[in-house]
Amino acid sequence: MVYGKVEICGVNTSKLKVLSGEETNNLLRQYRAGDVSARDELISGNLRLVLSVIQKFSNRGEQVDDLFQVGCVGLIKAIDNFDITLGLRLSTYAVPMVIGEIRRYLRDNSAIRVSRSMRDTAYKALQIKEQLTNENQKEPSIEEIAKVMGIKSEDVVFALDGIMDPVSLYEPVYSDSGGDTICVMDQVGDTKNTDENWLEKIALKEAIENLNERERHILSLRFFDGKTQTEVANEIGISQAQVSRLEKTAIDRIKKQL
């Protein structure tokens, strides 16, 4: 069972009933005829479907109880809006509804905050994208979506990027037969935190530690506290010329060690 849990939100998932296709269709007809109790049976009889969906979001760090409740909201929306005349299975319609509800929850509760207006723009762009795809039988370009919305293409791109789910640096992107896995972080370049920069920082730290206490104090006041040579001189009780000379000597010593 999901996350090794048997009971989720007070529901014993090991004893959930699973409805057959015929039972589901009969209950749907009863519900459409006004039988509210049939709706409750449809919900309880499709909770396993919700469980199967939330397993796809098991690596997001969210509480399984929260995802289950949100998934149930999607299931209820699917049952309430399902058109029995289309000849589809309820699960075919419900799964995308449950997934959409969970993704909306994850986006709205993401640590990366996206403005409401940008989310609205993104959702509208997705609706237009689906509409144009159905009309033209092919996926529209960003420019086509922007034209229908009457906004710049860049705004569409920014909005769609804003609602994308964050990907963990440890997300595997490839695994060979030998068991070696390549993660996202293995494909990300970093020009700042290279081995050379780490070595330079270590060497600089060691060079500063080799200065005497007065020299370290002067450099700290000058380059960390941002004080002028005159201010440093007044603080430690020597002349500005002496500060200048000691500062230059200390920097020269550091350069030689680097």
Image (spheres, grey):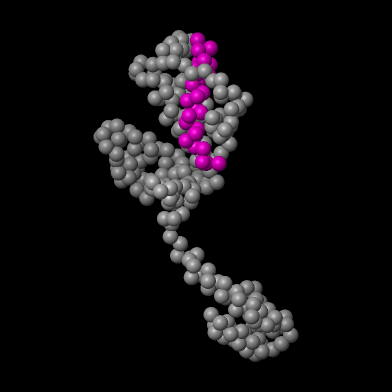
In which quadrant of the rendered view does residue 229 lie? bottom right
Give the image location of residue 247, x and y in percent.
Answer: 62, 84
Nearer to us in this view, 154 or 6: 6
Nearer to us in this view, 104 or 92: 92
Measuring 39% from the left and 16% from the top, which residue is drawn there?
Answer: 84
Predominant SS of the magenta segment: helix
Nearer to us in this view, 136 or 54: 54
Give the image location of residue 116, x and y in percent.
Answer: 50, 42
In the image, the segment drawn in magenta is 35-61
Give the image location of residue 190, x and y in percent.
Answer: 46, 62
Which residue is farthest right? 237
In the image, is residue 139 above or below residue 214? Answer: above
Examine the rendering and report whether any part of residue 174 can be seen. Answer: no
Magenta-colored stretch includes residue 53: yes
Give the image location of residue 124, x and y in percent.
Answer: 40, 37
Measuring 51% from the left and 41% from the top, which residue is drawn there?
Answer: 59
In-image side of 150 versus 225 (left or right): left
Q: In which quadrant of the rendered image does the N terminus lie? A: top right
Nearer to us in this view, 172 or 90: 172
Measuring 44% from the left and 15% from the top, which residue is drawn there?
Answer: 20
Which residue is farthest left? 136
